[in-house]
Amino acid sequence: MRASSFVCTLASYLKSVAILLALAACALPPKPSVTPVAPTPVLTPVPWSAVEGWEGNDAAGAWPALLASCQALERQRAWSAPCQAAARQIPADDAAARRFFEQWFVPHRLSASDGSDTGLITGYYEPLLLGSRNQSERFRHPIYGVPDDLLTIELASVYPELKSYRLRGRLVGNRVVPYYSREEIDSGTRPLAGRVIAWVDDPVALFFLHIQGSGRILLDSGEILRVGYADQNGHPYVSIGKKLVEWGELRPEQASMQGIRRWGEQHPDKLPRLLAANPSYVFFRELPPPPPQGPDGPPGALGVPLAAGRSLAVDPRAVPLGAPVFLATTWPNRDVPLKRLMFAQDTGGAIKGVVRADFFWGFGEEAGRLAGAMRQQGRMWVLLPKNGS
């Protein structure tokens, strides 16, 4: 959902471009002397009785998400048997579903190497925007596809130890420079002619579409257009909520998605400066309609549709994509436990760390309200197949 890559046919060219881009855009030395610090997860097998809230949870509700994960994982040796078993049965109730997971999986407590097992749980959703295929006075904010001049370089081609890192930029003559920032793109310094998928009427809604990574556009023709993440301009993400707090415009507790939107409505003259504070810019692709059965969310990084209330975006260096994850947290803005069997089916640029996840709430206004307010602490248990754990 939020990851893509650009493939070059000439390995030697790719290597030279990677070195140039490393020097020009990220100031990397010719050979890094220090390998970037990656999360150091610790997965400790525990009995089911140690999984907080396992007994009594609605495990049967996770079945469609399990079958979706199996679409991507069933050919892996460890997943073959449990996926075949899941396809043969529909659990009669939650107790039967729990027995299935207890039979085929082993729970592992997720913690960092320092012993911490608590981390930040945020939320995201699939928004609805109003738009058109044609530019007009009302619909004048573009949703761009991937530019033709965007270079994406996998650093592993030069430095194998940087296999999780990629650089993006563009060629100017024989030089590689950083790609255009959000401010440059929005100001028209470099309009991406011919790459517009649709035009929308709300710049703030468009900004949050970039953050969510996917959404639906209700076109003036009545058609519903679905778009999803295709690539990104390579600039780092900067939280505009934090910027508003730094500028003294909002208190920390007000810097939710809803609070930022209200601020934008009250200060339209200051809005361009705020949006430009985040130089990161996302490019999209059109998505096909959802399948007739199963989850109807946008495809995540696993390549399967996300399930509302059952899919998580995780750091794949800490949690294997596709794995069941039991999450113990609280509801947004409420001190009420939220303990649920989820599936790691997505990733995100801001989702970095060991005990760190983004909870997919689904589509629409209510999902947006919950996602925008969610900033909870939580714990996670990763369920791994018995014959592969």
Image (cartoon, rainbow, N blue to C red):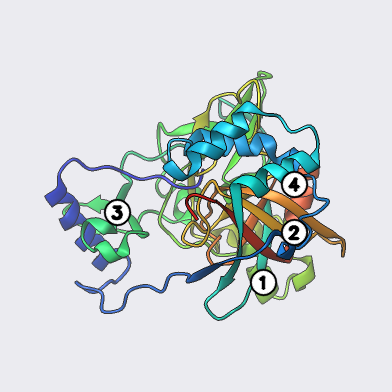
Mark 2–mark 4 Cα distance, whole angstroms, equals: 10 Å
Determine whether the residue tagged by mark 2 lies in a helix, strand or loop: loop
Q: Position of residue 8 (x, y in %)?
A: 22, 43
Q: Earlier in the sequence, mark 1 or mark 3?
A: 1
Q: Which mark is residue 368?
A: 4
Q: Which residue is mark 3?
A: 154
Vertical side of 115 occupied by 197: above or below = above
- How would you rate the neighbour count of disc 2 (Cα within 10 Å): few for under 14, some for 14-19, many for 20 or more? many
Q: Amino acid at mark 1?
A: Thr
- Amino acid of disc 4: Gly
Whichever of labels 4 and 1 marks the residue nearer the N terminus, that label is 1
Residue under label 1, please give it. Answer: 118
What separation in Å lies between label 2 and label 3 (alpha carbons)? 33 Å
Element on which disc 3 rests:
strand
* Residue at the image position 66 percent from the left and 18 percent from the top: 221
Q: Indicate whether 363 appears above or below 294.
A: below
Q: CA distance from mark 4 to mark 1?
A: 25 Å
Compare marks 2 and 4 and give the one earlier in the sequence: 4
Q: Which mark is residue 374?
A: 2
